[in-house]
Image (cartoon, helix red, strand yellow):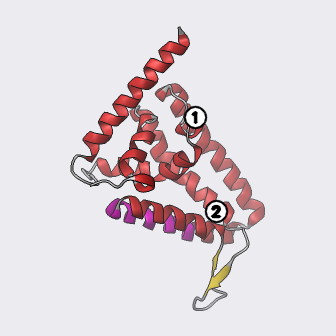
């Protein structure tokens, strides 16, 4: 059964899902949300480390803001759903590890350009998805922190739903009804503003 409060997966998923009902927009997000997360970590790899974890054959593993961000996302996802959250946490740390290796090979002078280009490219498609297909402003305009924090997990849960994953029995039915209610409320509000 679902959790309440900050780790209420159903509430978070319904909020985010209300802004992502069009299949093309969902697909666009599935393609571009994780690269946004990855490139954010890539840039944060250049922040000074708080300390180094000892590692064989080197200076150790630097724990910096990239690690903190990956850890926060991973813990948030784990606390919302153990199974899918474990996969999401693994992906967060895979992104952290990969971005660290990528940062070391690129160096800051090239990395920030790669991050800028990737972020602009990914965000442009996200806004096209909302403007052209969803015809609704992105969730980040209504709840910035929730939209940024939930986006990677949302697209992962969307992908897992294609193979039949459900965090608990009745999750998708409950979320679908909440999304439908929110979309109807938004439509009514939109019609009132236009008339």
Q: Which residues are magenta?
A: 82-98
Judge from the rendering whether residue 51 lies leftward or rightward of residue 27; answer left or right. Answer: right
Magenta segment, prevailing SS (helix, strand or loop): helix
The label number, if any, that marks residue 39 in the structure image: none
How far from the left and from the top, in percent, is residue 103? 67, 67
**Residue at the far bottom in the pictured view:** 56
Residue that badge 2 annotates: 42
**Figure quadrant of the N terminus:** bottom left
* Element on which disc 2 rests: helix
Residue sitting nearer the eye, 162 or 82: 82
Residue that badge 1 annotates: 127
Q: Residue at x 57, y 58 (%)?
A: 38
* Distance in Å between CA atoms under marks 2 and 1: 22 Å
How far from the left and from the top, in percent, is residue 122? 59, 44
Q: Residue at x 73, y 67 (%)?
A: 107
**Residue at the far front in the pictured view:** 5
């Amino acid at each position: 059964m679902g959790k309440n409060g900050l780790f209420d997966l159903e509430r978070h998923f319904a909020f985010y899902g209300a802004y992502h009902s069009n299949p093309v927009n969902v697909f666009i997000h599935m393609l571009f949300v994780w690269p946004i997360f990855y490139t954010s970590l890539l840039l944060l790899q250049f922040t000074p480390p708080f300390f180094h974890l000892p590692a064989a054959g080197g200076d150790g593993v630097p724990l910096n803001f990239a690690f903190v961000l990956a850890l926060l996302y991973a813990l948030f996802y784990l606390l919302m759903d153990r199974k899918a959250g474990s996969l999401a946490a693994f992906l967060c740390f895979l992104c952290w590890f990969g971005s660290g290796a990528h940062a070391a090979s690129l160096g800051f002078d090239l990395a920030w350009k790669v991050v800028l280009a990737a972020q602009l490219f990914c965000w442009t498609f996200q806004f096209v998805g909302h403007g052209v297909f969803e015809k609704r402003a992105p969730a980040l305009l209504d709840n910035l922190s929730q939209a940024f924090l939930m986006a990677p997990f949302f697209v992962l849960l969307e992908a897992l739903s294609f193979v039949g994953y459900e965090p608990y029995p009745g999750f998708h039915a409950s979320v679908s009804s909440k999304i439908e209610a929110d979309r109807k409320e938004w439509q009514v509000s939109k019609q009132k503003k236009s008339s």
